Amino acid sequence: MQDYLVFQLYAPLVAWGDQAVGQERPSADHPSRSALLGLLAAALGIDRSDEAQQAQLSAACRFGIKLYTPGLAMRDFHTAQVPPASKKAKHLYTRRDELGEPKLGTILSFRSYRQDSLNVVALWLNEYSAYSLTQLQNALRQPHFHLYLGRKACPPATPLSPELGQFASMKAALDTYAPADELRPLLERARSRYYWEPHSASGLEETYRGPRYDQPISRKRWQFASREEAVFLQGEADHVPQ
């Protein structure tokens, strides 16, 4: 038996960051590891610039995800004013600082979102974690900073409702959790998929494994490393809790 903390993530719009090249800012169909760590760090009150605490949290946590519905894709066109690039320019800490610079230029970019995406997340801890699941549960119930699902324009539309429990497998933890009643219409048309960090007690046979570039190296420099993600696509994945 393993202890798990299980919670739900739903919003009308979410944006699960993926590899960004040039002007494109895509969204994956399910949460990235970096997004989940960022959510927990915000709940705990860990500043993004505190790399030691960020690394400690990352080393402690492992995740499994049950994607009930990825939602409809939406692509948004953005224009933004930015100061000219210069190696000699002073560091600008806020958006207000940027807009106060002379000779602003304009950049074009595309942002991708998911509409009506519903995920359930199971979290378990390494043996030598500096945190407890109870501590993380309390933080998600009463977060220190505002929580959002990928971008600041994407706050959760329902409470995360974190629940603690002991289960024989990660799949059992995810399948036992019942999302909020108001989300039942999404479950009725769900064809669930599972994504997880390889785990001996997953309770699932992998359909395949693939790389995902969402393991944070440095929040300050916005650097990420590759990791392996296990995927299960069919069969019992259609289970919906009653």
Image: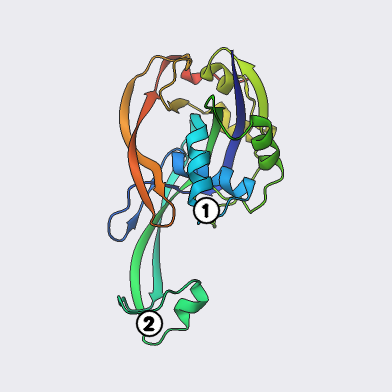
Does dot 2 land on a helix, a strand or a loop? Answer: loop
Q: What crowding class fits label 1: few (fewer than 14 Cα within 10 Å), some (14-19), or many (20 or more)?
A: few
Q: Is residue 242 visible?
A: no
Tell me where residue 135 sits by quadrant. Answer: top right
Residue situated furthest bottom in the rendering: 102
**Disc on res. 104:** 2
Does dot 1 land on a helix, a strand or a loop? Answer: loop
**Disc on res. 50:** 1
Q: How far apart are marks 2 and 1 (CA)?
A: 31 Å
Residue drawn 39% across the image and 70% down it: 79
Query: Mark 2 or 1 closer to N-term?
Result: 1
**Residue 36 horizontal/vertical position (percent):** 51, 41
Residue drawn 59% across the image and 49% down it: 42
Q: What crowding class fits label 2: few (fewer than 14 Cα within 10 Å), some (14-19), or many (20 or more)?
A: some
For this view, does 216 lie left or right of residue 183? left
Residue situated furthest left in the rendering: 22
Please state which amino acid type lies under the numbered disc 1.
Asp
Tell me where residue 194 sits by quadrant. Answer: top left
Q: Which of 231 and 181 is in front in this view?
A: 231
Q: In this view, does 17 lie above or below 220?
A: above
Please state which amino acid type lies under the numbered disc 2.
Leu
**Residue 114 horizontal/vertical position (percent):** 46, 46
Q: Do the residues labelled 2 and 1 touch (CB within 8 Å)?
A: no
**Residue 142 horizontal/vertical position (percent):** 72, 45
Circle 2 or circle 1, nearest the eye? 1
* On-image quarter of the C terminus: top right
* On-image quarter of the N terminus: top right
